[in-house]
Image (cartoon, rainbow, N blue to C red):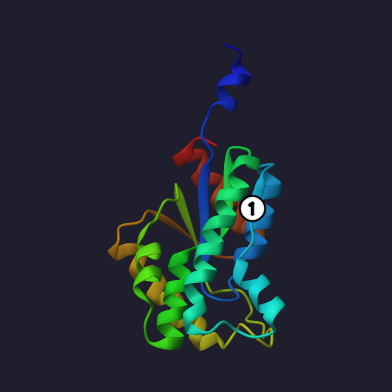
Amino acid sequence: MEAGSAELNKPVQKIVIVGAECSGKTSLAQALAKHYNTVWVPEYLRDFVAQHQRTPKEHEQIDIARMQVQREAEMLPQANRFLFCDTSPLMIRLYSEHYFGKADLALFELAATHDYDFTLLTSPDFAWVDDGLQRESPAVRQRIHDKLQQELEEREIPHLLLAGGMQERLDQVAFAMDFLIGA
């Protein structure tokens, strides 16, 4: 077997990037996909908001989460070693709980299924920018971050907390992936 062919047979590893609003998830997903010469899955919620020109209603949360997972499945065959996913059903569930006081059972169950190989958690240390529709405030961003970090720890989901500027975050991810995953 040639050295390169063993590489081709490795399964694609799904890396999810989670974090509160305006914490650099999308920029990081794009940068990591470029760095590792692969593809990334954009956050479907952005498309939903752009299409409907409003934030989603409570009953739409599960469909948004399902579409996010569907897009991951669609992009997986195009990925080269890694598929970087900008958000997860867990984030949708946390925001649903924040805005509506609850998440429906189907969303809760989907969010409980964590099928990612590694989780990156972005710190809310980027400047907060109002986008007019999705983002609420720096205070909400911090609350969501705290809830997310607590949930990851309670569920014992291994994750790397990323902080600093984009290059610092890229360096942190590269170090972790080289060390933990053998990238």
Q: Is residue 98 left or right of residue 124?
A: left
Expressed as whole percent of the image width and height from the top left, the position of residue 126 reads 61, 74
| Front-most of residues 125 and 149 | 149
Coordinates of residue 111 in the picture (x, y in percent): 40, 64
Looking at the rendered structure, the kind of residue marked 1 is Trp
Q: Is residue 162 above or below residue 59?
A: above
The residue beneath circle 1 is: 40
Q: Visible in this render: residue 182?
A: yes
Where does residue 99 sit, x and y in percent of width and height?
A: 46, 87
Relative depth, front residue between 34 and 14:
14
Is 48 rendered above or below residue 76? below
Instruction: Indicate the quadrant where residue 93 lies.
Output: bottom left
Please name whichever residue, 64 or 179, is drawn nearer the observer in this view of the structure: 64
Relative horizontal placement of residue 26, taking residue 152 as reference (left or right):
right
- Where disc 1 sits, the SS reads strand
Q: Is residue 122 visible?
A: no
Q: Quadrant of residue 52?
A: bottom right
